[in-house]
Amino acid sequence: MARKTYSEEFRRDTVELYRSSPGATVVGEAVDLATRRPAGLQEHGDVLRDLEDGQRLDLSPAAFARLIGHLLRNTTAPFWGARHLTKIVPRLRDKVDASELRPLVEEALRLGCNDAPTW
């Protein structure tokens, strides 16, 4: 596979664009890109497990809450990731506003996680 090369000007412009975006984070920008298209969780995927076990969640909790809500919205039943959400949601609850967590919890309820409001 050929490696893409970018001009020095392109690199400078990219960095400047990022730096000039107030409050922007790499994680936030990545989530913005990820949520532009429908995406869901695979039945035996590792996304939630990786977020549960890692420290990524702490880097940008609001962005990850939005990403997880987006992924759940496009996930179909049966849903097997509830055990991961029971550990992820309390970590998010301590760091984000309830309004940012509401879509995630609503989608978990839709997928059959009846105890989602108590996480």
Image (tube, rainbow, N blue to C red):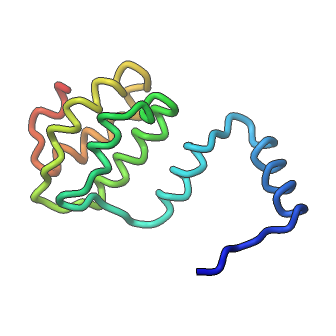
* Quadrant containing the C terminus in the rendered view: top left
**Residue at the extreme right of the image, as rendered:** 9
What residue is drawn where x is 31% and y is 61%? Answer: 40
**40 on left or right of 31:** left
What residue is drawn where x is 42% and y is 30%? Answer: 55
Determine which quarter of the picture holds residue 43.
bottom left
**Residue at the extreme top of the image, as rendered:** 94
- From this view, report whether residue 26 is shown above or below residue 101: below
Determine which quarter of the picture holds residue 88.
top left
**15 on left or right of 102:** right
Viewer-proximal residue among 30 and 7: 7
**Residue at the extreme bottom of the image, as rendered:** 1
- Percent from the top left, x then y, of residue 75? 24, 60
- Percent from the top left, x then y, of residue 90? 28, 24
- From this view, report whether residue 34 is shown above or below residue 83: below
**32 on left or right of 100:** right
